[in-house]
Amino acid sequence: MPYADNHGTKIFYDTYGQGTPIVFLHPWTTNGYIWYYQVFPFALTNQVIVVDHRGHGRSDKPQSGYSITEHAGDVAAVLDAAKADRAVLVGNSIGGMIAMQFTLDNPGRVIGNLILSSGTGLGEGMPKEAAQAFARDFEGTFGALLEGAVSAKSKRERPEILEVMKAHFRVQSNFPKHVFDSSMADPNGVFGWNIKTRLSSIRTPTLVIAGEEDNATPVAANKFLADNIPGAKLSVVKDVGHFHQLEKPLEFNAALKEFVSALH
């Protein structure tokens, strides 16, 4: 199995196909399997690279080191290992954060960014009670958050989506509790990371996609990104929550294909 090494932390990645590289970066608590509906359709025309973030899936899970900057460093290590100089980045949730940070750190290596259901400064204004609930009962609190991250139509017609999303974070070998604790405690972790004043420095072609029914990273959080990244476009999708690539994979793939085609 291919691994990249970032200063001793091993990062798992899969790669298929040839052509312009597309790197898929998954949401927090999940792993690269979430991109199943995208990997092989895009591997017909592109080199597809799917990453398991540190602390997730088949990658190493150190006790600390979960800043978004460190995650972005892992992406650089993966690109080097996969012999990809430049790539299109596709990031969902924390994956979108990692894509934006990577672009700030390595602007010459990014062809374009598709940011799906993401944001920055997500912990701003988080009630103390919410943080305490996370610490006291992570499974119950995060499970409730996921209930609001899947659209009503998906929950009604495709209940397996919510089931599999809830199962990801309950399997300790996929997402251990110490990764949650360290990510929450890190001032530049998933909730603390804030680049609001640096978004204008992202000059890469960017498409931001938001699910109309996403209560995890609401439309407003995604609109803020699109409004502050120069030239970025915003697409808001009906009957979709946080996981467009699962809830409406054919629509998502069409949007990604159009975005990638326009970059050439």
Image (tube, rainbow, N blue to C red):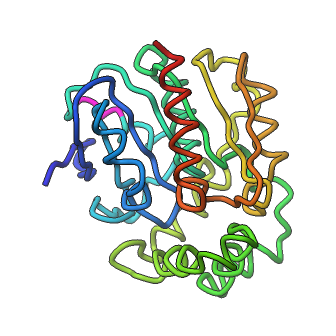
Q: To which quarter of the image does residue 119 belong?
A: top right
Left or right? Give the position of 144 relative to 1: right
Q: In the image shown, does 99 or 115 lie closer to the viewer?
A: 115
Q: Residue at x 21, y 33 (%)?
A: 82
Query: Is residue 3 one of those drawn in magenta?
Result: no
Q: Quadrant of the C terminus?
A: top left
Characterize the magenta stretch by its predominant secondary structure: helix
Q: Residue at x 55, y 73 (%)?
A: 161
| Span of residues in magenta | 76-80
Q: In the image shown, does 51 or 62 lie closer to the viewer?
A: 51
Whole-percent x, y for residue 65 in the image: 43, 53
Q: To which quarter of the image does residue 21 belong?
A: top left
Whole-percent x, y for residue 133 in the image: 73, 81
Total labels: the figure holds 0
Q: In the image shown, does 216 or 54 lie closer to the viewer?
A: 216
Left or right? Give the position of 20 relative to 236: left
Q: Residue at x 76, y 27 (%)?
A: 197
Residue 89 vs 175, above or below: the answer is above
Q: Residue at x 57, y 33 (%)?
A: 100
Whole-percent x, y for residue 186 in the image: 57, 56
Q: Quadrant of the N terminus?
A: bottom left
Whole-percent x, y for residue 118 in the image: 66, 47
Q: To which quarter of the image does residue 143 belong?
A: bottom right
